[in-house]
Image (cartoon, helix red, strand yellow):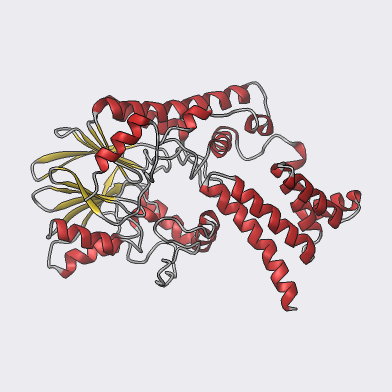
Amino acid sequence: MADLLGLSQRVIDSGVADQPVNRTTGELSEVADGLAMVESFSHTVAWDSGEGLVCFDASHYNTGAPIVGELNKWRPGRIHTLVYTHGHIDHVGGSGAFAAHNVANGHAPLRVVGHENVQRRFDRYRTTDQWNRLINARQFGGVRDDLGMTNDLRPASGGGQLPFFLPPDTADVTETVGDFLSDTIGGTVVEYHHGKGETDDHLWSWFPEKKWVATGDFVIWNFPNAGNPQKVQRWPIEWAATLRRIMAKEPELLLPAHGLPIAGKERIARVLDEIASALENLVREVLGMMNAGATLDEIVHTVKVPADTLARPYLRPLYDEPEFVVRGVWRQFGGWWDGAASRLKPARDAAVGTEVAHLAGGADVLIRRARELATAGELRLACHLADFAGWAAPDDPEVHGIRAEIYEMRRKSETSLMAKGIFKGASRESTKVVDDARKS
């Protein structure tokens, strides 16, 4: 078993993450008496209630069964309750294995606790199945993470791809939570609290007698996922407010769904305060500029999170990033129009690209200039020109070969997985044009 609390203490107190903190080892580690964490695609936190295990999150559909195996080696017997911290598939997708464990061993059916919006999310996932599969493939970009997941969410070791975004055996919620629910299991009180943050169906769970808090994705050991460019609205100001409510409980052990557990009242308070403050300050600056009449373009290129804040081991922009959160705040308070009149009812991209290429002297001129800019480090501007050229010459393998090259350069220059995935997707688009030309 790994000393997860010792590792997190050293990383937080030193401010240096000299080894991975978002680990997906698949191993179970005890973090308190009768309390364990299995580190996976999302973690499963398990508490031995005396009446059976109470588990927080079921991880991904590729990892649910191995997690159940780890739990069964630690505390064989019934899984009494599964709590969904929220309805993302990396937290609920493995639930079929949890339910199947009880059935196979003759235990009572699995009790599943979740917020009232979880089932609505499941309905939306079924309605937008192919769209969600497409955007996740792009988001994860074909770059394998520590678990070995590929861009289409198949395990690298060769397992099959599911035919649905939401696994068909995902366990439905059997006990819904509104804003609050107090539960007693094995004589111990567990409180479920609702708060918006990464999602609108998020719960954090509080053990008042033990001073434990299971936070789900309110703490992810990365900059908060509050601005994902391909997903539905996130809630940064509400996220910060929830962190403040958790702080007020003065927890002594914090159990996240990603990253390391954290022990110590003062240490936990410091981490929660810094995450909340980063979000609060960003929202305040964005709203201040909106109130002053600034456009989204001005705000995106002005509002920044200080570099020393982003250097914190639990605030690094390796998944989402502040620039995307800025856009999320704009969308939450200002709608989808960015303030540029031409983009209210724009021409087609292909028409714009063709006209710009005509003015420049051809798509080949544009793409060569894009390469010059990229080589000089002006990657943002280079990508604009590369897109114009690609739209103007959709079947030109030379243009698209250079466009693919530019977007590979852009991908390598980025820190966040989301940016890397989208830019890798753009590179793939152009690589396909080149490959198709070679085949014809």
Query: Which one is in front, 221 or 191?
Result: 221
> Visible in this render: residue 250?
no
Q: Is residue 143 shown left or right of residue 394?
A: left
Image position of 437 with respect to 133: above or below: below
Image position of 324 with respect to 392: above or below: above
Name the residue: 70% across, 34% down: 339
Name the residue: 12% across, 67% down: 106
Query: Which one is in front, 248 or 184?
Result: 248
Query: Which one is in front, 349 or 212?
Result: 212
**Based on the displayed image, in which of its 4 quarters is residue 414 positioned?**
top right
Q: Position of residue 3 (x, y in %)?
A: 24, 44
> Visible in this render: residue 424?
yes
Q: Position of residue 18 (x, y in %)?
A: 39, 41
Query: Which one is in front, 228 or 8?
Result: 8
Q: Is residue 136 shown left or right of residue 25?
A: right
Q: Position of residue 258 (x, y in %)?
A: 35, 46
